[in-house]
Every structure is written in C-alpha cells, then in structure tokens.
Amino acid sequence: MAEALRNAGVAFDLAETREPGEAIGLAERGAREYSGVVAVGGDGTVHEVVNGLMRAGTGAALGVIPAGSGDDFVKMLPAADPIERLARGAVRKLDVGRIVADRRCYFANGMDVGFGAHVARNVAAVPRFLTGLGAYLGALVITLLRYPALRLRLQLDDQPPFEQATSMTAVMNGRSFGGSFQVTPQASAEDGLLDLLVAEQVGRARILALVPKLMRGSHGGEPDLRMLRARRVTIESDEPLVVEADGEIVFERARRLEIELLPGALRVIA
C-alpha cells in the first residue's frame, strides 16, 4: 500500500495504532499538522479518526483506504480505487452525527440501541475463523438467545415525544450497517437529515423473517418497522442502554441520548 501511494504521488507520514481508541488521539494531533488524515482499516478505524478530526475542529479532511470486514462508510462515497481517490484529492462535505450522553461522541455512518447494538457487542464472542458477514451472522445468532426488550421515550425535532417498545432503534447517516444490512436504503449523508429505523418489539421468529429483507433493503412497508427522518433525536430509557456507533460500543449504561446531525461538518476526500 505504501509503495502504491508513493507511486501515485501521495506524500504521507505513517502512524500505526497498537490498541483500540488510539486512532482518536493520533487523528486529533494529525489534524493540527496535516491537511488530511487517512484511516486504513474498517468502520471502527474510521469512527475513531472521525472523532479525532471533529475534536480538533481544524477542517482537516478524512481519507479512507478500506481494509475492514464491513466497510459501510465507503459505501457512501462514489465507487473508485482508494489510492486514485487520494491522489486526485477532491473533497466533498458529508454530514456527521453527534451523540451527547455523559460525554460527546461522533458517528460517521450510524448508531443504534437494542438488537443491533447487542449484535455488535457479541461479535467478540464469535469464533475467530468467522469473519465479515459470517461473524456478524454468528453474533446475530448469539444475540437471538437473549436480546433486550426496550421501552424508549423518543422525541424527533420539536415533535411531541412518544413511547415505543422496540427490539431495535437505529439512527443512521448512511444506508447500511454490519456490512450487508440495508437498514435505511434511502439515506444520504448529504441531505441534512438522520434516517431512523424503529422496529417494534417482536419475537425471534419475526426477527429471522426480517433479516433477509433488511439485507436486501426491501423492508419498506413492513407493519412492525417505522422509517422516520429528523435532524435531532432524543432517546430516553429507564433501563441502561448499550449503544453502538459505527460498529463500536460507545456507551454501555446510557439512559439519555441527545443525537444531532451536523450538516456538511465532515470534509472527506472523495
């Protein structure tokens, strides 16, 4: 990869992470010295780099060389060879999400509570020979054995709040998570809106029936799934929530989440 970048005329300095979370600080420091920071890895790496860039607030651009199992973030970008994309250097502005709980956290692709968050947490329990979609499906099976029944209070923008018994509530900037699940197929990271999938509380058999439709993005119109849009979302729960963002567990005992879209706040080499 390094040789390909040099051959394409891309000047760079290389920094390697040694532990989870380290890319946040590296990206924050890099954003103060360079015009762009490139994430080489999967959605978790992109998540950390985005958080570092947003903390720095310098306007440094995000570049991505996908090397993960899902790589949902790059699906928001026009199809192109990543090295050619970096060499070309064209920049576009994408929306980015912000979650405020006991601290502030940003997400590039999406976040959720409920079933999807527990699947993301259970990926660590899947046998190592399973990767990519296989690992996600393995975690899905583990989660089916015991998954949370949530009752949330939701408020979208300035609309009246409502209560919802839910298996999963996803708040998305992009279209997919888990590499193959098209949860909000109509979403755009440039429209200034968050797209929500709110699944009513359903049983295991219904979840399994919905999985193929979610993978195809053909679940529109399903009576137990609500598709909504908003700029701001507040989620409250009497019970502590596990929260996933960009495939990473970012909170484990949250009771109130204030989620807001920041239009065009992320400069991306695209």
Image (cartoon, rainbow, N blue to C red):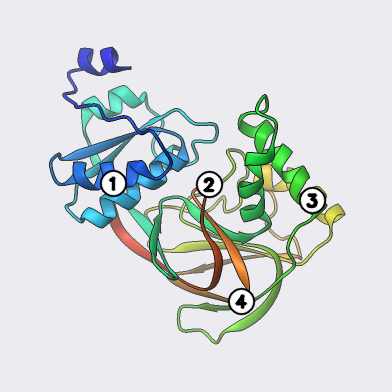
Task: Check if mark 2's residue and mark 4's residue have beta carbons within 8 Å.
Answer: no
Q: Earlier in the sequence, mark 2 or mark 1?
A: 1
Q: Amino acid at mark 2?
A: Gly
Q: CA distance from mark 2 to mark 1?
A: 19 Å
**Marks 3 and 4, the one that precedes in the sequence:** 3
Distance from the alpha carbon under mark 3 to that under mark 4: 22 Å
Q: Quadrant of residue 196?
A: bottom right
Q: Looking at the image, which residue is at 43% across and 37% down?
A: 74
Q: Nearer the viewer, residue 270 or 148?
A: 148
Say few, some or many: other residues with alpha carbon within 10 Å of mark 4 (under 14 / 14 to 19 / 20 or more).
some
| Label 2 vs 4, first from the N-terminus | 4
Mark 2 vs mark 3, CA separation in Å: 18 Å
| Three-letter code, disc 4 | Ser
* Residue assigned mark 1: 25
**Residue pointed to by mark 4:** 237
Q: Nearer the viewer, residue 126 or 10?
A: 126
Q: Disc 1 residue type? A: Gly
Q: Residue 27 lies in what quarter of the image?
A: top left
